[in-house]
Image (spheres, grey):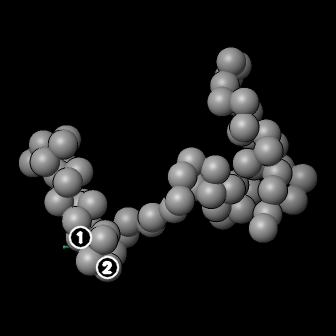
């Protein structure tokens, strides 16, 4: 929670005070791959499809499909 508080403070300074960040609603991951993987798992059911405009991040296919 301490790290999330620091991230919320940093983001408020970086983006400006017009946006507020609630540390309880911040999810931290170890990079884009786990973030995409977690979002995919939360948003989709088995057999669903994501429509993504190309060109896109080459690791996206892998990130969406993997579940650790
Ligand atoms: C922050 O988020 C938590 C969990 O969703 C919520 O209970 C709390 O009221 C929120 N705090 C503010 C200041 O919005």
On the question of residue 39 being in view, the answer is no
Contact, mark 1 vs mark 2 (Cβ under 8 Å): yes
- Residue at 79% in and 63% down: 67
In the shown orientation, is residue 34 left or right of residue 48?
A: left
Tell me where residue 43 appears, x and y as whole percent: 66, 58
Mark 1 secondary-structure assignment: helix
Q: Residue 5 carries which label?
A: 1
Disc 1 residue crowd, few under 14, some 14–19, many 20+, Cα 10 Å? some
Tell me where residue 57 appears, x and y as whole percent: 66, 30
Mark 2 secondary-structure assignment: loop
If the image is split into quadrants, where does the N terminus sit?
Answer: bottom left
Q: In this picture, is 65 found above or below 53? A: below
Q: Does the residue labelled 2 lie within 8 Å of ligand 1?
A: no
Disc 2 residue crowd, few under 14, some 14–19, many 20+, Cα 10 Å? few
Q: In this picture, is 44 found above or below 14? A: below
If the image is split into quadrants, where does the C terminus sit?
Answer: bottom right
Residue found at the far bottom of this picture: 1
Identify the residue under disc 2.
Answer: 1
Please state the quadrant of the image where ligand 1 appears.
Answer: bottom left
């Amino acid at each position: 929670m301490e790290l999330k508080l620091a991230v919320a403070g940093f983001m408020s300074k970086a983006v400006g005070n017009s946006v507020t960040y609630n540390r309880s609603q911040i999810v931290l991951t170890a990079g884009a791959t786990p973030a995409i993987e977690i979002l995919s798992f939360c948003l989709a059911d088995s057999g669903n499809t994501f429509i993504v405009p190309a060109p896109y991040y080459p690791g996206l296919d892998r990130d969406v499909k993997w579940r650790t």
